[in-house]
Image (spheres, rainbow, N blue to C red):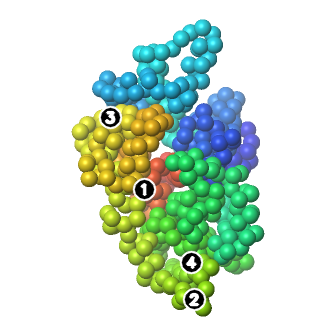
Amino acid sequence: MNMVHTEIRDFLFLIMGICLVFNNIPDIVQLKFLGSGIGNNLVAYPILFGAIYTIYCHLKSGNVLVEYKRFLLYGGVYLCILFISLIVGLIHYPYYDAIVSVPIEQMGKMATIIIFCEKIGITIEGKAIALLWGIFRFGGIVLKFIMTFGVSYMIFCWYHDDWKRGFNFFTKGILCSLIFVIGYSVFEIQYLAGGEFGKQFLEQINPYIHVIKVEHDWWPPLLWPDKQLRSVFPEPSHMGNYAAILLPVLWFYLLNDSRDKRFKFVLGTGYSLFIFMIFLTQARTAYAMFLGITMLMVAGLLMLDWRRYFKIVIMILSISLGIFFLSVRFINYIDNIGISKDIIEPPKISAVEVVDKNLGSLAGEDKRSNGSRYALLKAHFRMGMESPLLGKGTYLNDSYTKDYFEFAEKENPGVKMWIGNQNKFGVLKYPIGAMNEYVERFSANGLMGLSAFLFPFGWILYKLIWLIKKKKCREYVCLLIAVIAALVVGANDSLSVVYGLWLLLGLSYAVVLGQGSDG
């Protein structure tokens, strides 16, 4: 790839890895014109600079964009499916009256255009508003494609001729991000332990790290109320999403024989502190992601060379188990702050109870927030089954959700809150999404749209597994596990909360299709 200054490209990729932890930055610095999936993420800045730099280099040298015919072919098919789905959805959409009648402040980006037109003497109302709204849906689809698959293609173009260089810079960025996570969490742990200094520090710095109380009048709060660690993220569960990319990278460097022992000691300390923090989140997502990623990494490494890695895998697992028991003792300590031992025997939670609370509760429909989440998934699944090929249309499906809850599900407090907020704020300002990337896409675009979306991931996972069998390479295993783990995040949330997936996808394609690859 003939880029003018490759060090600029490498620096931007490094910064992208660092910025991934700041996934809901304050409103004033969000790049909202890039869309909600990335505009609220700090990584939007290096991506935007990278896109401008890539276009500049291509205009200057003319050979930066490679394999563009494949990308355009896939993009054309994918966008056609989504456009057809949206057109059919707009034809049958029953909520136009609700859109036309909402106050202008609830219309988001449309409000800017309507106000501008009114200033120059053009009045937009009635059917014109509905038409403008429909046009915005098409624009939103194209923008989201550019900021997801388009960014992946940019990363592929950057490193198609030297994927190991890209792997090195991106993983180093991920490791650097851990410094911010640990540094911040030191103060949060001090706060959880009852420290006033930690509390004051968090109150001062949190408004500069992420938004405060932008949803449901409370989320994310200034300080998390349930004695759970959340670090720099809006909520504790996002630690699990971050672990999807961080843990495979940490394992990769810990298992590198050529690394300096002091560097490994620092990495080992960072790994130990991070999993201690994972357990302190007391979040089901974080616990489940840690367990799942660890199992995948063990399976992948033993598949590579079980004789070589068996002892160190046992050592890492033993350390992890020891840290878990240490975290249980700390959880008991923070739970009993303020309880006088002279008056009452402080309650204690056992390691088994911690596991049951954070892993055993995943399967129970009546456990924690499962009732409302399961109801939401069922509603979107019913919606998708009604239009199984093309769905209800991108950005349209979330307006239908309340109509697909069953009577018993509407009695759930969480479901009542969602329906009440949508009735209060309208379908534009308060859509009810599935909180699951794949069910959301099934209800929006049907089986055709979901299959088109998943195709690039399925193909790259197949090729990475094939490469691992052909050539025992730890980089391949690291990428494979990280991509799988990031995709798993989509089963519990939108993939936009773990934007690193799109960077990993581009890097993985550079591994498989790049110059000098084994694919």
Q: Is residue 24 visible?
A: yes
Spot occupied by residue 463 in the image (x, y as percentages of width and height)? 42, 54
Tag 3 secondary structure: loop
Q: Which residue is mark 1?
A: 492
Tell me the CA gap for discs 4 and 1.
Answer: 27 Å
User: What type is the residue that disc 2 sits on?
Assistant: Ile
Q: Residues within 10 Å of mark 1 (few under 14, many from 20)?
A: some
- For the residues labelled 2 and 3, say whether their Cβ atoms are less than 8 Å apart: no
Spot occupied by residue 244 in the image (x, y as percentages of width and height)? 51, 61
The correct choice, above or below, for 452 with respect to 330 in the image is above
Q: Which residue is mark 4?
A: 335
Instruction: Name the foreground residue: 195 vs 482.
Output: 195
Tell me the CA gap for discs 2 and 4.
Answer: 16 Å
Residue drawn at (57%, 64%) of the image: 225
Q: Earlier in the sequence, mark 2 or mark 4?
A: 4
The correct choice, above or below, for 395 with respect to 366 in the image is above
- For the residues labelled 3 and 4, say whether their Cβ atoms are less than 8 Å apart: no
Q: Earlier in the sequence, mark 4 or mark 1?
A: 4
Q: Quadrant of residue 253 in the image? A: bottom right
Q: Which residue is mark 2?
A: 343
Q: Which residue is mark 3?
A: 392
User: What type is the residue that disc 4 sits on?
Assistant: Asp
- For the residues labelled 1 and 2, say whether their Cβ atoms are less than 8 Å apart: no
Tag 2 secondary structure: loop
Q: Residues within 10 Å of mark 3 (few under 14, many from 20)?
A: many
